[in-house]
Image (cartoon, rainbow, N blue to C red):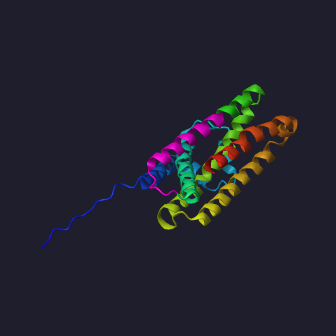
Amino acid sequence: MEPIIRTTENIDWITILIFGSLLFVVIAKGIFYNRFLNFAILPFNNKYIFMYNKKEKLVNWFHIFFSIFLIINFSLFVFFIWKAFSEPSQQIDAAVFLMILAGMIGFIGVKVLLQFANGFIFGTNRAISEIIFKKSSYLNHSGFIMFLANVILAYLLKDSKLVIYVALALIFFVNGIGWITLLRNHQKLISNNFFYFILYLCALEIAPLIILGSYLK
């Protein structure tokens, strides 16, 4: 009887990332169960915004857990987009993802700081804080879509452009609802500062998307 040589594969770093990010959702649900239930239906019912807009806003563990969940899955989703459309000839390792992750953290961090700076300059700190909370809440919720897309792209339909397009459409849909809600709730502020709002929209919302799209291209 001849011995059979077994080859063991290295631990899949994508699996670790996906299930590691899910751990933050599990923790958030376990500690903040009622808040999680309101957050889960955010695109269909903005009760979450009204209940928690005045309470700790950005600096609370629930928001932090979901922000980490988002950043991991957002970075991984961007990684899959790059992989699907660039069609690299060489094997891709975790180093590429780490570069995207670092860029994502820097991108989001700089954007938030510029938003707060904008609020400080024009004396609208409170309004800007509320706007950041509302936008980030909807963006964090779209992390669920990115998570499901990452699972499909990693294990079921690798490099599927259809999955990417559908996921992007759903992400824009969820965040579009957030923007509509935001504009409706801040009509007076926007009308009184229309020029600054347009400047804010172009400099801190549209321009970063164009830069990110150009980088991926």
Asked whether 99 falls inside the magenta stretch, the response is yes
Residue sitting farthest toward the bottom: 1
Residue occupying the point 73% across, 30% down: 119
Up-down relation of residue 204 to residue 8 (above or below)? above
Where residue 111 appears, as percent x and y from the top left, is 66, 37
Asked whether 214 falls inside the magenta stretch, the response is no
Where residue 23 appears, as percent x and y from the top left, is 46, 50
In which quarter of the view is residue 187 placed? top right
Residue stretch rendered in magenta on the structure: 88-112
Residue sitting farthest toward the left: 1
Where residue 28 appears, as percent x and y from the top left, is 51, 47
Residue sitting farthest toward the front: 89
Residue 165 appears in the rendering: yes
Q: State the predominant SS element of the stretch in magenta.
A: helix
In which quarter of the view is residue 106 placed? top right
Give the side of residue 196 with respect to residue 61, left or right. right
In the image, 70 versus 153, the foreground residue is 153
Where residue 44 appears, as percent x and y from the top left, is 69, 58
In the image, 182 versus 216, the foreground residue is 216
Residue 65 appears in the rendering: no
Residue occupying the point 54% across, 45% down: 100
In the image, 36 versus 80, the foreground residue is 80
Residue occupying the point 53% across, 52% down: 76
* Mark count: 0
**Considering the image in quadrants, where does the N terminus appear?**
bottom left
